[in-house]
C-alpha cells in the first residue's frame, strides 16, 4: 500500500529549523456513538473491540513542524485551532520545547502532540550518531539524503530513540505523540534484512506501536501517521488513540487522489474512525476549489482535517 509523507523541508544544518510539514485547515465533525455497529464491508477484524468516540475529538487541527516564529510557539498559541501537531524540538535537534511552552499552548485550548519518526532516523537528529554506531541503519529513503530506515525492532532502537523521545514528550507535558514512518515496513530493502518479509516487518511495526502504548500508559496518547492497513493486525486498534492520514483526497499539489490506494486508505481510515479513534487528515492543496472540496470531504467523513502546503512551516486558517 502506497504511503505518502511528501513534504520534506530540510535543515541547512543540524541545528537549523528542520523537516517538512506545515499546518492546517480544518473541519467540523459529529461525535461517534459508543459501540456503534459498523456497516458491512467496514467491520473491524475479530479480536478488535470497537470503543466509544474519543472524549476530546478536535473539530480542527494545525500541523507545523518547522518555521516557528522566533523559535517559539506564540503564533501557534494565538491560532484558533483545537489541536496541534508540532515537532518534539523547535530546531529538529536538541532544542526541545519546554513544559512552560507546551502548557501555554495547551492553555490556548489545544490538544498538543509531539511529532517524531519511529521507522527512520534523520542525520540531523541528536540520536543519529549513537544509532549510526550500531548496525541499525538500513537503506536511505529515496529523495531524502539525510534520512535512513532503521531496524526499528532492535532493542537498541527502543533504548536509544523511542523510550527517550517518549520520556521527553511526557516530561514536556504533551498530550500525546504523533509517530511517523510506520510505512518503513514497506520501504526497507529486504536484501539488508535476510529472513524478513513484508508481513514480518509489518508485525514488528505493530509490536513497536503496542510497546509504545504500553510504556506510555495514561501519560501519552498514541497517534500514528499513515499505514492505516495495520489496523488489520490484532491488537493494533487497541494500542492507538488515533491516526494521522495524508492525501486521502488530494496529492501534492492540487492533484485529485484517484489511485487505488487512495480509496483503500479511505476505507481503512473509516474503520479506524468507527472504532472511536481520532482521525487527523491532511491534504496538500492551494487552489480555493480544492481546499473547499477537501474541507467538505472532512465534514462528510467526520474527520478533523487540514489543507496544507507540503513544507508544514507556517500557520494557516482552519477549514471554514
Image (tube, grey):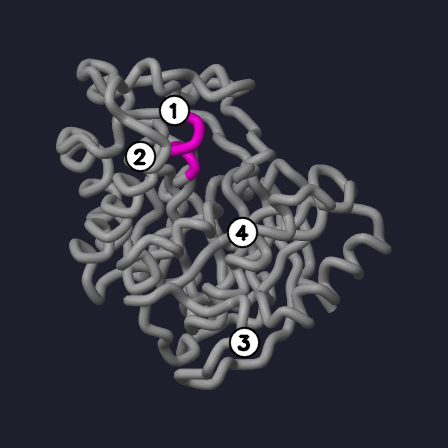
Number of numbered discs overlaid on the protein picture: 4
In whole angstroms, how far apart are the C-alphas of marks 1 and 4?
Answer: 21 Å
Asked if marks 1 and 3 touch (Cβ < 8 Å), the reply is no
> Residues at badges 2 and 1 in contact (C-beta under 8 Å)?
yes
Residue drawn 44% across the image and 27% down it: 187
- At mark 3, the secondary structure is loop
Q: Earlier in the sequence, mark 1 or mark 4?
A: 1
Alpha-carbon neighbours of circle 4 within 10 Å: few (<14), some, or many (≥20)?
Answer: many
Residues at marks 2 and 1, CA–CA distance in whole angstroms: 9 Å
**N-terminal-most mark, 4 or 2:** 2
Q: CA distance from mark 4 to mark 2?
A: 20 Å
Front tag of 3 and 2: 3
Q: Is residue 236 visible?
A: yes
Residue at 14% in and 35% down: 159
Write down the residue under mark 1: 188
Q: Identify the image quadrant of residue 13.
A: top left
The stretch of residues the image draws in magenta is: 183-188
Instruction: Classify 10 Å Cα crowding around label 1: few (below 14), some (14-19), many (20 and above).
Output: many
Q: Position of residue 302 (x, y in %)?
A: 60, 72
Q: Visible in this render: residue 124?
A: no
Structural crowding at the residue carrying mark 2, measured as other residues with C-alpha within 10 Å and reported as few (<14), some (14–19) or many (≥20): many
Is there CB contact under 8 Å for labels 4 and 3?
no
Amino acid at each position: 500500500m502506497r504511503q505518502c509523507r511528501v513534504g520534506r523541508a530540510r535543515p541547512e544544518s543540524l541545528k537549523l529549523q528542520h523537516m517538512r510539514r506545515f499546518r492546517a485547515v480544518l473541519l467540523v465533525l459529529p461525535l461517534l456513538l459508543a459501540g456503534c455497529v459498523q456497516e458491512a464491508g467496514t467491520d473491524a477484524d475479530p479480536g478488535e473491540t470497537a470503543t466509544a468516540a474519543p472524549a476530546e475529538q478536535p473539530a480542527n487541527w494545525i500541523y507545523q513542524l518547522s518555521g516557528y516564529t522566533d523559535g517559539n510557539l506564540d503564533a501557534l498559541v494565538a491560532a484558533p485551532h483545537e489541536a496541534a501537531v508540532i515537532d518534539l524540538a523547535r530546531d529538529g535537534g536538541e532544542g526541545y520545547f519546554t513544559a512552560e511552552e507546551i502548557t501555554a499552548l495547551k492553555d490556548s485550548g489545544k490538544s498538543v502532540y509531539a511529532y517524531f519518526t519511529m521507522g527512520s532516523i534523520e542525520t540531523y537528529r541528536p540520536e543519529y550518531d549513537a544509532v549510526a554506531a550500531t548496525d541499525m541503519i538500513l537503506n536511505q529513503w529515496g529523495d531524502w539524503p539525510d534520512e535512513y530506515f532503521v531496524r526499528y525492532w532492535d532493542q537498541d532502537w527502543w533504548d536509544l530513540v523511542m523510550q527517550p523521545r517518549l520520556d521527553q514528550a511526557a516530561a514536556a507535558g504533551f498530550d500525546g505523540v504523533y509517530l511517523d514512518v510506520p510505512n518503513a515496513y514497506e520501504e526497507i530493502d529486504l536484501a539488508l534484512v535476510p529472513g524478513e518479509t513484508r508481513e514480518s516487518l509489518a508485525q514488528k511495526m505493530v509490536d513497536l506501536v503496542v510497546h509504545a502504548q504500553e510504556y506510555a500508559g495514561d501519560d501519552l496518547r498514541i497517534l500514528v501517521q499513515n499505514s492505516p492497513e495495520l489496523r488489520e493486525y490484532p491488537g493494533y486498534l487497541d494500542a492507538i488513540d488515533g491516526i494521522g492520514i495524508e492525501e486521502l483526497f488530494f496529492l501534492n499539489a492540487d492533484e485529485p487522489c484517484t489511485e487505488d490506494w487512495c480509496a483503500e486508505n479511505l476505507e481503512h481510515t473509516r474503520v479506524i474512525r468507527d472504532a472511536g479513534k481520532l482521525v487527523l487528515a491532511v491534504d496538500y492543496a492551494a487552489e480555493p476549489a480544492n481546499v473547499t472540496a477537501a474541507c467538505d470531504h472532512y465534514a462528510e467523513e467526520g474527520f478533523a482535517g487540514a489543507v496544507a502546503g507540503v513544507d508544514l512551516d507556517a500557520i494557516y486558517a482552519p477549514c471554514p
